[in-house]
């Protein structure tokens, strides 16, 4: 069995795979709880033979996971890093190490699933949108996610003090809360839509697969005006490609 970890800015995702690659268990844990030792109790009942991780979180979180892996199972945690190229996909960054490893793995996994051009929309603390053509990875966009955008308005305006709403849609808001929450949602939908239009123009295709992942991904996907596929484990799927 293999245990996999995806360390984000606010939470850690994990899953346990069989030798054949089937998902046996999965879960999430807030980073604060992990740093307080909750990971050991969460995973104490499993017995993997390998452990691998991708993380964009701080060094303290990586160290905590590595220590847990060693303490529980006597294993060394393999960690994925961004590469200059993998198969047909080349990293377009001048300094390839500056591309986030989670974005890189999502691109590789989506290309593997699509076998060609595709769009990836990852909705976490930040929203990232990646474009992959038949020539490979083109590049992408990063904008603040829902919470970060709300926090900016809350901190830097006198009157727009809005907490997260329970509902998002595309309608014009008839309250400050709805105007903020729906406006943020429209901005993210607009980014994904524009990126898709650009990719269709570059490839000359009528349609491309669109893969959606991330903690706020299902919420955003419901409002996308085009077909898309929910694939929450996209980043973790990339681990098997770079750390087989």
Image: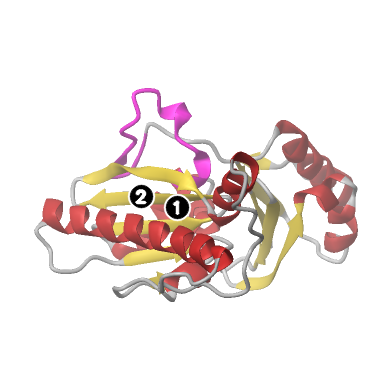
Secondary structure under tag 2 reads strand
User: Which residue lies at the image location 22% right of the left edge and 51% below the top edge?
Assistant: 133
How many numbered discs sit on the rendered protein? 2
Residue 2 seen anywhere in this rendered image of the structure: no
In front: 192, or 243? 192
**Dividing the image into 4 quarters, which one contains the N terminus?**
bottom right
Q: Give residue 56's position: percent from left, percent from top.
A: 60, 40
Q: Is residue 141 above or below residue 39?
A: above
Which colour style is shown? secondary structure
Residue 136 seen anywhere in this rendered image of the structure: yes
Q: Give residue 235's position: percent from left, percent from top.
A: 51, 55
Q: Is residue 183 rendered magenta in the image?
A: no
User: Which residue lies at the image location 44% right of the left edge and 76% below the top edge?
Assistant: 222
In front: 82, or 12? 12
- Answer few, some or many: residues within 10 Å of disc 2's Cα (few below 14, many 20 plus, some between 14 and 19): many
Secondary structure under tag 1 reads helix
Q: Give residue 181's position: percent from left, percent from top.
A: 53, 63
User: Which residue lies at the image location 56% right of the left edge and 54% below the top edge?
Assistant: 124
Q: Is residue 90 rendered magenta in the image?
A: yes
195 left or right of 153 in image: left
User: Which residue lies at the image location 71% right of the left edge and 42% below the top edge?
Assistant: 77
| Residue hosting label 2 | 130
Give the residues in magenta: 85-103
The image quadrant of residue 26 is bottom right
Circle nearer the N terminus (1, 2): 1
Q: Assess whether mark 2 and mark 1 are in contact (beta carbons under 8 angstroms).
A: yes
| Residue hosting label 1 | 106
Q: Is residue 244 above or below residue 178?
A: above
Marks 1 and 2, how far apart at CA: 9 Å
């Amino acid at each position: 069995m293999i245990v996999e970890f995806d360390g984000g800015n606010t939470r850690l995702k994990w899953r346990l795979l069989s030798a054949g690659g089937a998902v046996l268990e999965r879960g999430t844990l807030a980073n604060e709880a992990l740093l307080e030792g909750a990971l050991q109790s969460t995973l104490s009942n499993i017995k993997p033979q390998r452990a691998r991780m991708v993380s964009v979180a701080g060094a303290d979180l990586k160290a905590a996971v590595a220590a847990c892996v060693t303490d529980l199972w006597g294993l060394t945690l393999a960690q994925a890093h961004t590469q200059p190229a993998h198969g047909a996909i080349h990293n377009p960054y001048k300094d390839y190490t500056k591309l986030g490893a989670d974005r890189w793995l999502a691109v590789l996994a989506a290309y593997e699933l699509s076998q060609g051009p595709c769009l990836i929309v990852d909705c976490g603390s930040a929203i990232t949108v990646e474009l992959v053509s038949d020539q490979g990875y083109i590049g992408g966009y990063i904008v603040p996610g829902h919470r970060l955008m709300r926090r900016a308005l809350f901190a830097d305006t006198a009157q727009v003090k809005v907490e997260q709403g329970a509902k998002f849609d595309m309608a014009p808001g008839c309250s400050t809360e709805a105007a903020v929450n729906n406006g943020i949602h429209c901005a993210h939908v607009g980014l994904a839509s524009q990126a898709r239009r650009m990719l269709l123009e570059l490839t000359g295709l009528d349609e491309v697969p669109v893969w959606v992942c991330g903690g706020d991904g299902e919420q955003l996907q419901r409002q996308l005006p085009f077909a898309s596929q929910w694939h929450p484990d996209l980043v973790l799927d990339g681990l098997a490609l770079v750390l087989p």
